[in-house]
Image (cartoon, helix red, strand yellow):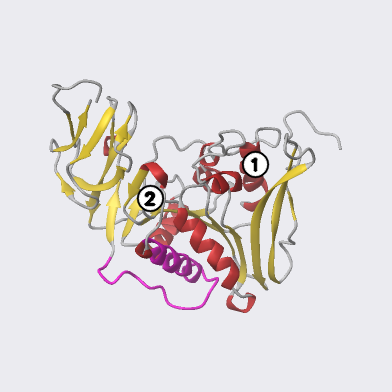
Amino acid sequence: MTLQPNQLRPSPISATVDFDADGVQHGFLKLPISTDESAWGAVMIPVTVVKNGEGPTALLTGGNHGDEYEGITSLLKLSSTLKAEDVTGRVIIVPCMNTPAVMAGKRTSPMDKGNLNRSFPGDPNGTVTSQIADYFTRVLVPMSDVVLDLHSGGRTLDILPFGASHVLDDKAQQQAALEGAKAFGAPYAMVMFELDAEKLFDTACERQGKVFVATELGGGGTSTPQSIAIAERGVRNFLIHYGLVEGSVEMPEGGQMYLDMPDASCYVQSQHSGVLELLVALGDEVKKGQTIAYATI
Amino acid sequence: MTRSGTAPVAYKAERDGILMARRAPSLINMGDTLAVIADVVERLEA
């Protein structure tokens, strides 16, 4: 194979599933690696494909960060229950995108310290994490119409449960994602301002014109009965909303609250090392100028 | 944390809203996001 200058080689990752075959398939995305423990080894990323005839393709992802458990848990469960006859089109489920990080219970990969959601669009000749990002960017995302990436706060954040979209130049694309973020049916729906969007999976999907919905669903390095219930209902709602599964979208009983993040002033960041005392709880109302936390230094 | 007799430092909200996210561990370092405040809006439109 002759590569032109600036032409990327194909991804080194190979799939053990046939993405074009009808039915339910469970397999792996295999990335060759060579380590002290395994000279001719592979990173094995679990993947499930559920396909039934013609229709849209939904890509459902969890474990982009390895310590965010609502996506990992709900998608692993879905992969064992979703039947081909329940689906119109194709559902690709990757519950543990950054499998080495998930197995370590950490945000980043123990293999290269890579933060997958800061590694896009990725590089076929890069680190393990960058090679995983590249496979999503150039193989899985192009075959998808709608993408749902399930995040939570991880070990260091606790976040209200919401479905989120972003402000995009293409307003039709933005509207389609916003409707999906609402239809996810979490207690909150959000237009999210990212601190630095350039290397996110979100941006890699949106630049290909895909409808992309992200979530935050709790955190603290664990899950709760409530957060798992929101995740599972949300995944089902997402598939119903975009026409892959029949049924009715179920919204929260108490209604849905809309949130907006206009700019970086939403983020309160520490200028000290010490002990944090927060004076308000998640969901509490705050006023500009209100003291919301102390740092005991 | 490294000496007694030092008053805590107050962090203030720079906008109205609700506490949307908070840091989970109590130990903090410079640059950590301590809190995120989001606007509550009546409508969300593209």
Q: Residue A18: percent from the left, percent from the top?
A: 75, 62
Q: Of residues A253 and A105, which is closer to you in this image?
A: A105
Q: Determine the residue positioned at 55% across, 50% down.
A: A209
Where does the magenta region start and end?
A227-255
- The vertical placement of B9 against A79, above or below, is above
Per the image, label 2 sits on a secondary structure element best described as loop
The answer, for residue A238, to whether it is visible in the render is: yes
Q: Secondary structure at mark 1?
A: helix
The quarter in which the N terminus of chain B is drawn is top left
Q: Residues within 10 Å of mark 1 (few under 14, many from 20)?
A: many
Which residue sits furthest right?
A1
- Does residue A231 show up magenta in the picture? yes
Q: Residue at x 23, y 25 (%)?
A: A297
x, y percentage for residue A89? 62, 70
CA gap, disc 2 to disc 1? 27 Å
Badge number at residue A158: none
Q: Is residue A162 above or below residue A290?
A: below
Dot 2 crowding, Cα within 10 Å, few <14, some 14–19, many 20+:
many
Residue A256 within the magenta-colored segment of the rendering: no
Question: Residue A112 appears at what percent x and percent y?
Answer: 60, 33
Find disc 1 in the rendering and name its residue: A134
Q: Amino acid at mark 2?
A: Gly
Does A127 sit above or below residue A209?
A: above
Residue A184 visible (yes or no) = no
Amino acid type shown at disc 1? Asp
